[in-house]
């Protein structure tokens, strides 16, 4: 069986990834100093920000365009026994994930219909998704 793929190993592609963007705040307990002063003017590390002077919350979820190179491709064939004798093929592309610092290589698994040839195509799809959102 010969299966044609939209992209090949080694191709540069663009895809949409959902990321969490934390919101950074100045610590309101130590007023951004990292230290809380006692009555005798001695200081202790702020228990809220742990001396970092800021803290963050989970922030917001955002769709961003990522760029990557296809490392390998997995093809899943589902031969359904039905009246149409239809064979379903799912093509999954594995793109090396450079966001995660680890001694092991991690991959983003992206299906063929979620890959784009250009940044502009992917960005256009994000705008289409976000057009349905209201704030």
Image (cartoon, grey):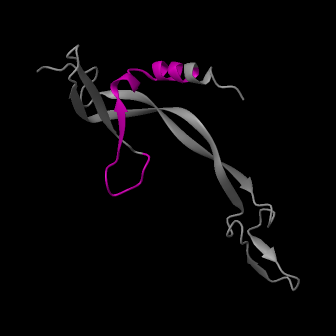
Q: Is residue 114 magenta?
A: yes
Residue at (32, 33) in percent of width and height: 69
Residue lying furthest top in this view? 84
131, 44: nearer the viewer: 131
91 or 38, nearer to the observer = 91
Percent x, y of residue 63: 55, 33
Q: Which residues are magenta?
A: 99-127
- Tell which residue pokes out farthest to the bottom in this image: 40
Give the left or right position of residue 132, taking residue 99 as reference: right
Residue 77 in the image, given as x and y percentages of width and height:
21, 28
Could you tell me which quadrant the N terminus lies in?
top left
Quadrant hosting residue 102:
bottom left
Q: Quick check: 42 above or below 79?
A: below
Query: Where, by quadrant of the figure, is residue 118 drawn?
Result: top left
Based on the picture, tell me whether residue 55 belongs to the magenta stretch: no
Closest to the observer, 109 or 96 = 109
Residue found 52% across the figure and 18% down from its top: 124
């Amino acid at each position: 069986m010969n299966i044609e793929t939209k992209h090949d190993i080694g191709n540069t592609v663009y895809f949409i990834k959902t990321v969490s963007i934390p919101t950074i705040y100045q610590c309101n307990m130590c007023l951004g100093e990292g230290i809380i002063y006692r009555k005798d003017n001695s200081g202790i590390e702020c228990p809220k920000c742990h001396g970092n002077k800021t803290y963050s919350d989970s922030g917001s979820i955002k769709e961003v365009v990522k760029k990557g190179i296809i490392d390998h491709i997995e093809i899943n064939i589902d031969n359904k026994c039905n009246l149409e004798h239809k064979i379903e093929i799912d093509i999954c592309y594995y793109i090396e994930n450079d966001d995660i610092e680890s001694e092991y290589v991690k991959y983003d698994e992206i299906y063929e219909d979620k890959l784009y040839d250009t940044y502009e195509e992917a960005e256009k799809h994000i705008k289409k998704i976000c057009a349905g959102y209201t704030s």
